[in-house]
Image (tube, rainbow, N blue to C red):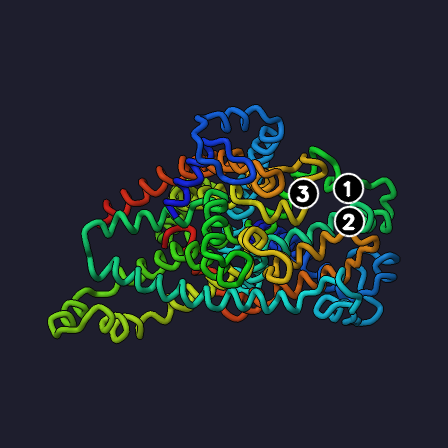
Amino acid sequence: MYGFIGWTFYISLTKSKLLPNYEFWGIHQYVRLWQMPRWHIAVENLFIFTTLFIVLCIFIGVILSIFLDQKIRSEGVIKTIYLYPMALSFIVTGTAWKWILNPTMGIEKFAHQIGFENFQFDWLVTPGMSIYTVVIAGVWQSSGFIMAIFLAGLRSIDDEVIKAAKVDGASTFSIYTKIVLPMMRPVFMSAIVILVHLSIKSYDLVIALTAGGPGISSDMPAVFMTKMAFGRSEVGLASASAIMMFATVSAIIVPYLYSELRREQDAK
Amino acid sequence: MLNKKKVSRIFLFLVLGIFVFYYITPLYVMVVTSLKTMNEIREGNLFSLPNSINFESWKIAWTGRGEGTSDVFLKPYFFNSLKIAIPALIISTFLGALNGYALTKWKFKGANLIFLLFLFGTFIPYQAILLPMARTLGLLGISNSPIGLILVHTVYGLGFTTLFFRNYYVSISDEIIKAAKVDGAGFFKIFFKILLPVSLPILVVTIIFQFTQIWNDFLFGVTFSFGENAPLQVALNNMVLTSASVKYYNVDMAAAIMAALPTLIIYVLAGNYFIKGLTAGSVKG
């Protein structure tokens, strides 16, 4: 695996087009990469997607997990429903949402039929908006899982803490915002790392839902990389973009793993 | 006071209910659409129920219309996926168990470093290994074959399976192992006689996790195989993206449900193990 990454890194420093070319070419591929408007669109989209995806997933995850923790009777059933999307592939998710968001046959038609004649919902085919449909589907797929992580975190907090705060007269809201959530900082960290990781790898969902379109408006680095490598025969350029992705993931994961290991050692 | 409590309780259920609706709607839409005829789809809307239960589109999605080459249907690809998923699952799980065992019970110099490399390996974006992997498969002469994909999934899955077993075996007492070593039991004997029999819970978690990963994979499938060797998710995507003049949404939905069914069934039957795997796989354990 690490050998492969080294190979990719080296190729990113060469002139490779259709076939690998081992002649050294310095950082030219990276310069080319950052001069391509298309790469900028991809990075910008990744930024929009990652930000919204993380914020929404965590927001929904926190709210649902706290609500579910209030001794709900049908908790098991509700949890099953919240989590099942996680068992589906991104391709299935994309296929389903593509149909629901279909501008002529989907939600829009439903709204027309129940009387909202002017209702318009065509994000899927609108450049600049299609990336948000990817967010909707992505959040649908992953937020239940974040809820499960937070729920596990909530359950591990000592009940005594909450009881003591109640005795002191704190309201439920302030117990959660002032005591419980700050205690869950490690859970937040894990959730963010998972979500960043998921969103940088997000390829399948974009392909199934919008295929990067309309045009190239919902391209993401992962999509860009495969298109360059297999569609345009720009192996060097594709490698450069893959290394950019790898570096981004590493920049987030390495400090995280480091702090996790430190914590483990401290616990010993 | 009691009234206030009641109000907040109702609010709670309302929010939970809205989200139940949000999560369940796509599944509902998929199922009803797959049971409708195209006429019903054109006349009705997303949420309307079919006039009669009609499994025609399921049949078409599974075995096709019998219209020659442009006809894409899922049956052969379903078995492709099984052919890839099952061996890859067995090999990566077994090797992961061995790795986990060696890393915890035969502490050697650098074991922690190796574990760290495995751990980091689970976070590597697929794209970073895609090109050299394609090249390697080509050199080995196993590109575009189930064997190639089995190898890819085994290599990529090894990080996860090692992680699972390592974290599980760490908590097993070293005393028993030491005693067995004193009695002269070797590396494999200890593994098969002592560790494997107590590994059932983690085995189930790993198998479910790996199966879901491999079954739902798209990128490796689409990169390393084409045509009739493609796995199911690739076939599903091709089917949906087909440029045919008439789109059969009901067939698309039936196909999507079929592609999701194996993992959904596992999830319903073994939900707890499933969640444990996901959590352990991404949070380190």
Type of amino acid under label 1? Phe
* Amino acid beneath label 2: Ile
- B245 or B141, which is in the foreground? B141
Q: Are marks 1 and 3 on the same chain?
A: yes
Residue pictured at 25% horizontal, 65% vertical: B172
Q: Position of residue B114 (x, y in %)?
A: 28, 50
Give the label, 3 or 2, closer to the camera: 3
Label 2, secondary structure: give it: helix
- Secondary structure of the residue carrying tag 1 is loop
Q: CA distance from mark 2 to mark 1?
A: 7 Å
Separation of marks 3 and 2 at Cα, in angstroms: 13 Å
Amino acid type at mark 3: Thr
Q: Quadrant of residue B81?
A: bottom right
Q: Secondary structure at mark 3?
A: helix
Q: Is residue B72 visible?
A: yes
Disc ID at residue A266: none
Q: Nearer the viewer, residue A234 or B208?
A: A234
Write the residue at 65% across / 51% down.
A94
- In the image, taking residue B44 as reference, residue B227 lies left or right, namely left
Question: What residue would you read off at disc 1?
Answer: A121
* Other residues around mark 1 within 10 Å, as few (<14) / some (14–19) / many (≥20): some
Rate crowding at label 2 as few (under 14), some (14 to 19) or many (20 or more) other CA atoms within 10 Å. Answer: many
Say which residue label 3 marks: A133
- Residue matched to label 2: A107
Q: Quadrant of residue B264?
A: bottom right
For the residues bearing labels 3 and 2, Cβ distance under 8 angstroms: no
The residue marked by circle 2 belongs to what chain?
A
